[in-house]
Amino acid sequence: MKIDNFKVEDWFNKYEHLASYDMADTCVESLSLDELFNLIGEKEKHLESIMNRKLNYGDIQGSERLKTAIKSLYKTDFPITITHGAIGANSLVMQSIIEKGDKVVSIIPTYQQHYSIPKSLGADVKIVYLKEKNNWLPDLEELPAIVGNNTKIICMNNPNNPTGSVISEDMMIKIIDIAKNSNAYILCDEVYRGLEHNHCRGKSIIDLYDKGISTGSMSKVFSLAGLRLGWILAPKKVMDKIIIHREYNTISVSILDDYFAAIAIENKDIIIKRNLEKILQGKEIMTKWVSEEPRITWIEPKGGTTCLLKYDVDITSEELCKNLLKDSGVLFLPGSTLEMEGYLRAGYCSDIKNLELGLRKFSEWLNKK
Ligand SMILES: Cc1ncc(COP(=O)(O)O)c(C=O)c1O
């Protein structure tokens, strides 16, 4: 099976280790186990419980404790399975549903899985771009024309990486109506759900649509990307297919990841409060900087951890990022890796201490152009 290079991951592999000021990360500053226990308490009890566990395969579909914790994030009781991160979740959904020749509509910019995996499976992939003039929200006049009545699945991500836009419930219902016309599934990658900046967790696609499929993970909302743990909630008919594929590439996830994920989600309010504080602190710094930097504009993000910056320099985003990194040690993600030339993606929640410094260095660099 041929597949395109994963441009974002390629970029990080090549350049992240060279950065002094990493402004490209999508995680809210990751937690160590010590920090996790400082937040949620009962360190001794948890450590004792995990130290005594046999390191066998554990519960193949994920422990009941973990699945119960995850289900508390949703209102609808859909079948669930545990995966290797959201990356494993998205991949399993697509492998299980999409067949050669199927029409797939992908709303981009987004995580590249959402268009490159369908393409690699031989699907007829139709792209719908989020546009700045629509505040990075889907164009509801364009979408129905592209979805038509023969789309198998719409792949999307809400809240959106990289733009930070958040689709409201009203708008999601309109998108669902468009999908219904085609009897299409909607895969909504919800790895940033819970990080809405107004503190109101948006409704999941599965709580709105019986052909909705939700993927999520510990990486962003819980700052525990190192657990490599994600999940899928999907209608039974879809989940039956997913389970077959999952048996070939997962068996189970680590029982350690399963345990730590469960206790983190059981304490979701504490962890999300910590993360939203960091996000809003980072956003305040970014907002002030953008308002004072004449060569940068943006649409203010409403959710998640990232934003797109439009720059007024006559140079490609890749050249800009490479030169900036070489000259100043500041790392952004070039828009070209997201099919968004002319923009940079910034993450503003990972290293708040360095954020101001990195932005100052970027301004100095821009002043010399
Ligand atoms: C939209 C989106 N989906 C999926 C992933 C992968 O997440 P995970 O670390 O849970 O595999 C990312 C990671 O950046 C992401 O931004």
Image (cartoon, helix red, strand yellow):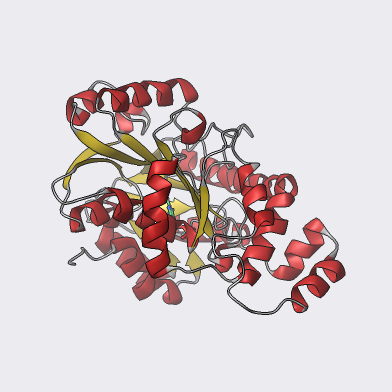
Residue 250 or residue 350, whichever sits in front: 250
Is 70 above or below relative to 212? Answer: below
Residue 158 or residue 95, whichever sits in front: 95
Q: Is residue 158 rendered to the left or right of residue 202?
A: left
Residue 47 placement (x, y as % from top left): 79, 73
Quadrant assignment for the C terminus: bottom left
Residue 246 or residue 225, whichever sits in front: 246
Q: Is residue 271 rendered to the left or right of residue 257?
A: right
User: Ligand 1 is located in which of the four quadrants?
Assistant: bottom left
Q: Residue 332: in sight, yes or no?
A: no
Residue 151 placement (x, y as % from top left): 21, 35
Quadrant assignment for the N terminus: bottom left
Location of residue 310 (image quadrant): top left
Q: What residue appears at the point 48 percent right and 44 percent down from the top-left corner?
A: 190
Q: Is residue 127 rendered to the left or right of residue 301?
A: left
Residue 74 placement (x, y as % from top left): 59, 38
Q: Residue 54: in sight, yes or no?
A: yes
Q: What residue appears at the point 43 percent right and 55 percent down from the top-left corner?
A: 89
Location of residue 189 (image quadrant): top left
Residue 345 or residue 52, whichever sits in front: 52
Q: What residue appears at the point 34 percent right and 21 percent down from the top-left corner?
A: 177
